[in-house]
Amino acid sequence: MAVTGYTQQQLSDFLENGGRLTFKVHASDIDETNGDAFERSPSIAPQLMSGFELPPTSIVIDDVHPYVDAQVRGDFWTRIVTAVYAKGGRIVYRKTGPQIYDAEASWGLR
């Protein structure tokens, strides 16, 4: 599905300078393999509306080879997730409708 809710200028500024940017994402962007199955996870289900985080495994961020692979071969959302977490940031998801989420990405905040 398409990730929306931003302009190209907002995205460029965010990736270069940090701050906060909220994307609209579909459940299938969050979990390409299982769709919205994560919504039923006992640790996530109670936080669907208030906000939850799904950071990537540390090997993707800490090891240059998986990171580069994610940046080169990953889809748009995978590249955003790995870039944000590699910069020490985070992404908090909040359900806003059936299989639709706000994904608030942030990094470099003081």
Image (cartoon, rainbow, N blue to C red):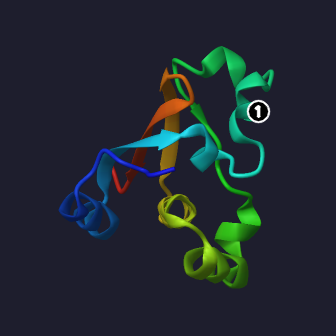
| Residue at 62% over, 78% down | 73
Is disc 1 placed on a helix, strand or loop? helix
Q: Nearer the viewer, residue 46 or 37?
A: 37
Q: Nearer the viewer, residue 110 or 101?
A: 101
Res. 16 image quadrant: bottom left
Place of residue 110 in the rendered image (x, y in percent of width and height, measured from the top left) = 31, 48
Q: Is residue 31 depicted above or below 88 in this figure?
A: above
| In this picture, residue 31 sits left or right of residue 75 | right
Amino acid type at circle 1 is Ala
Looking at the image, can residue 24 be seen? Answer: yes
Task: Name the residue carrying label 1.
Answer: 37
Res. 69 image quadrant: bottom right
Place of residue 21 in the rendered image (x, y in percent of width and height, measured from the top left) = 32, 47
| Residue at 49% over, 64% down | 76
Q: Is residue 104 depicted above or below 13 in this figure?
A: above
| Residue at 31% over, 47% down | 20
| In this picture, residue 46 sits left or right of residue 1 | right
Neighbour tally class for label 1: few under 14, some 14-19, many 20 plus, Cα within 10 Å: few
Looking at the image, can residue 110 be seen? Answer: no
